């Protein structure tokens, strides 16, 4: 029989203490310590680890090409880095109602339709409830096995017996280990359940997707150690102003964390959005004042977005500067460059900047587009919505080259744009559309 002892664990970071603390010394959060009964596994020998120790030189390890499982969904495979790696443990979180379970069920369905056995373990819904959701979203794979179970020992035992190509756990907060006295969802239960799933995935080679709840702060509930234990951490988010759902990787041992997958919630469930730029720009007029189109990169995906600017004279008081969707400090730099190089008098102007669609731009390649939108609004001159602006601004007004210029221009051409404004020092781009090269922001006067 394993020995037990009482500890106090922080529900935020997982730090432990033999006594209750009002403030966690690790994460500095208040009133996060919870009393728990833990099992002393080191003395009892009951802790489930690897069956054997493997050792090999790096050169002698052969990695086969079939180490990834294709889901059949381009957006999912892009986020995973080309497919789900066998034996990996993936944690997927998101706000309540965002569609985590629906997305996980869709992934399981696509993998099962390819002829693979997939097991979906649910601790929150009955088999009949899952069936209703499956019928609504068009999930119908015959090799998709639904299981209602919360005992982590039974879950891993079924996985070892059935040997599925993929397993989904919905959710980690409902699982529990029978030899722990704490309730399901507590810090120790979540940590121990995740550890057993990790060993099961590594020993059997079965990839496991774990669905996790989030706290009111938007972080995955449970100890922070949970994110360190898994191979990938994905967040499923809903865009504020559009019906878009975005799957974003914040940790990925087998791929880039810059990739995103874009989805749309429909009556038939979650569908991929393979051309979000087209959806965002379809309703634009031919010419607009105070507007410009920029091309930004989300990982390897180019996105065309509309930047809107509004300038209005203020006769008294300090003028407002309101920015949504781009970095505020970067906006101030662009503003200073315009005042200096184009001799604009913006000191008495309220200026409002917005990125249409509620998407946040984090790169500097939109500088030229921001400058064009502000200049257009101030001069009350129209800009063609069939012209894309690409370029970073230096403090001397120089339009500096940016990375992935070919992909940006090709995406604009694919969407039917007539012209593209790029930095003068950019490498030659193969395209049939008009390419306008400018070396300084002052040359915007000729275009707008």
Image (spheres, rainbow, N blue to C red):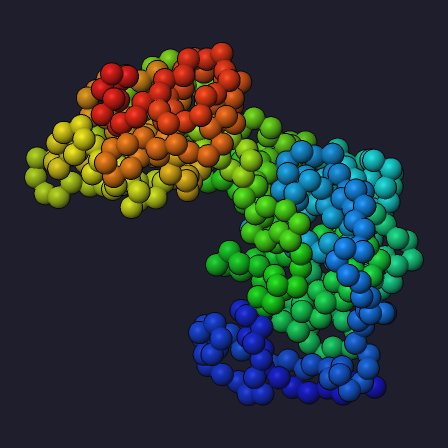
> Does residue 295 appear to the left or right of 399 in the view shown?
right
Viewer can see residue 307: no
Task: Decide which of 231, 286 is in the foreground and name it.
Answer: 231
- The quarter of the image holding the N terminus is bottom right
- In the image, what residue occupies the spot 56% across and 84% down? 17
> Does residue 31 appear to the left or right of 79 in the view shown?
left
In the rendered image, which quarter is residue 133 located in? top right
Q: Position of residue 445 (x, y in %)?
A: 22, 19
Q: Position of residue 84 (x, y in %)?
A: 72, 45
- In the image, what residue occupies the spot 52% across and 21% down? 410
In the rendered image, which quarter is residue 376 located in? top left
- In the image, what residue occupies the spot 83% across and 47% down? 165
Q: Is residue 396 above or below residue 226?
A: above
- The quarter of the image holding the C terminus is top left
> Does residue 392 appear to the left or right of 143 in the view shown?
left
- In the image, what residue occupies the spot 18% across and 31% down? 341
Q: Position of residue 32 (x, y in %)?
A: 51, 74
């Amino acid at each position: 029989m394993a020995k037990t002892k009482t500890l106090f664990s922080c529900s935020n970071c997982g730090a432990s203490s033999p006594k209750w603390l009002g403030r966690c010394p690790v994460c500095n959060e208040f009133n996060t310590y919870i009393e728990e009964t833990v099992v002393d596994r080191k003395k009892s020998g009951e802790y489930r680890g690897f069956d054997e120790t493997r050792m090999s030189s790096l050169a002698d390890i052969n990695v086969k090409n079939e180490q990834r499982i294709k889901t059949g969904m381009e957006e999912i495979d892009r986020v995973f880095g080309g497919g789900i790696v066998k034996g990996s443990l993936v944690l997927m979180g998101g706000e309540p109602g965002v569609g985590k379970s629906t997305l996980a069920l869709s992934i399981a369905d696509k993998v099962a339709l390819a002829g693979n056995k997939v097991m979906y373990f649910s601790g929150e819904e009955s088999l009949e409830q899952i069936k209703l959701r499956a019928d609504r979203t068009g999930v119908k794979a015959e090799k998709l096995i639904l299981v209602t179970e919360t005992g982590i020992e039974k879950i891993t035992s079924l996985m070892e017996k059935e040997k599925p190509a993929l397993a989904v756990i919905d959710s980690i907060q409902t699982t529990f280990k029978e030899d722990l006295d704490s309730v399901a969802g507590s810090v120790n239960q979540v940590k121990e359940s995740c550890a057993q799933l990790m060993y099961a995935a590594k020993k059997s080679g079965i990839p496991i997707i774990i669905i996790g709840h989030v706290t009111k702060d938007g972080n995955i509930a449970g100890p922070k150690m949970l994110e360190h234990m898994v191979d990938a951490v994905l967040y499923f988010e809903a865009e504020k102003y559009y019906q878009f759902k975005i799957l974003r990787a914040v940790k990925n041992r087998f791929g880039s964390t810059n990739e995103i997958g874009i989805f749309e919630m429909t009556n038939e469930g979650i569908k991929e959005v393979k051309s979000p730029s087209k959806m965002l720009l379809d309703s634009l007029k031919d010419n607009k004042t105070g507007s410009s189109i920029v091309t930004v990169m989300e990982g390897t995906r180019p996105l065309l977005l509309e930047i809107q600017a509004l300038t209005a004279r203020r006769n008294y008081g300090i003028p407002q500067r309101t920015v949504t969707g781009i970095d505020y400090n970067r906006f101030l730099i662009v503003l200073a460059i315009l005042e200096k190089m184009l001799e604009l008098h913006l000191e008495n102007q309220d200026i409002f900047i917005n990125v249409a669609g509620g998407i946040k731009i984090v790169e500097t390649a939109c500088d030229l587009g921001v400058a064009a939108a502000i200049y257009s609004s101030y001069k009350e001159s129209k800009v063609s919505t069939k012209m894309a602006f690409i370029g970073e601004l230096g403090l001397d007004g120089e339009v500096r080259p940016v990375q992935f210029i070919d992909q940006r221009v090709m995406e604009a051409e694919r969407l039917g744009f007539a012209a593209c404004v790029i930095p003068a020092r950019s490498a030659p781009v193969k395209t049939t559309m008009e390419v306008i090269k400018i070396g300084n922001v002052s040359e915007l006067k000729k275009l707008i």
